[in-house]
Image: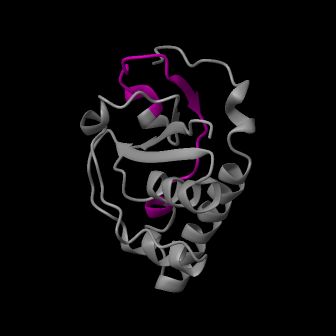
Amino acid sequence: MATKLKILFLCTGNSCRSQMAEGFARALKGDVIEPYSAGVEVHGMNPLAVKVMAESGVDISKQRSKHVRDLMDIPFDFAITLCDQANQSCPIFPGNAKRVHVGFDDPPILAKNSKSEDEALSFYRRVRDEIKEFVEKLPDNIMDEPQQKGGI
């Protein structure tokens, strides 16, 4: 059996986008990817992210928010930054991990002025679906991406 690719999904607080990506990678690509997620800060799990992922059949409620420094000893093949702040703050990892940036909107910021939970959830669902579409194409869609400056 071939070794699975170790992929880190990195965003600001490891509460929403990176958690969704980890959940989808585990559910959809678990045969070829060993997914992880972390943040450059730790904000805890976002309950609306957990809710919209459950709607799509993926339970991320047992995942936990982690700081990237807690994963520094893992030899990642790829570190995928999902937001600009994480891309700018991404640490240098030991080994030969390739860093790729694929930005997604931040659902909590989009939903900040929502007048109802349903309105807020619409933003989370849109970003969830975009992340799912990205993860479904892994790893082919990142194999030839250029290395990011200040990379890993």
User: Residue 35: image x %, image y %?
Assistant: 49, 47
> In the displayed structure, would residue 71 be above or below residue 61?
above
Q: How was the colour assigned to the protein in this rendering? A: one colour
> In the displayed structure, would residue 31 be above or below residue 146?
below
Q: Is residue 102 magenta?
A: yes
Q: Nearer the viewer, residue 39 or 29?
A: 29
> In the displayed structure, would residue 42 be above or below residue 10?
below
Quadrant of res 75: top left
- The residues colored magenta run 87-109
- Decide if residue 116 is in sight here: no
Q: How many numbered discs sit on the rendered protein? A: 0
> In the displayed structure, would residue 44 be above or below residue 123?
above
Q: What residue is rendered at 27% in x and 55% in y?
A: 43
Q: What residue is rendered at 34% in x and 49% in y?
A: 13
Quadrant in which the N terminus is drawn = top right
User: Residue 38: image x %, image y %?
Assistant: 36, 45
User: Residue 119: image x %, image y %?
Assistant: 55, 80
Q: Nearer the viewer, residue 10 or 77?
A: 77
User: Residue 10: image x %, image y %?
Assistant: 44, 41
Quadrant in which the C terminus is drawn = top left
Q: Residue furthest front?
A: 1
In this rendering, would 84 be left or right of 45?
A: right
Q: What residue is rendered at 62% in x and 36% in y?
A: 2
Q: Nearer the viewer, residue 23 or 105?
A: 23
Quadrant of res 63: bottom left
Quadrant of res 145: top right
- Decide if residue 11 is in sight here: yes
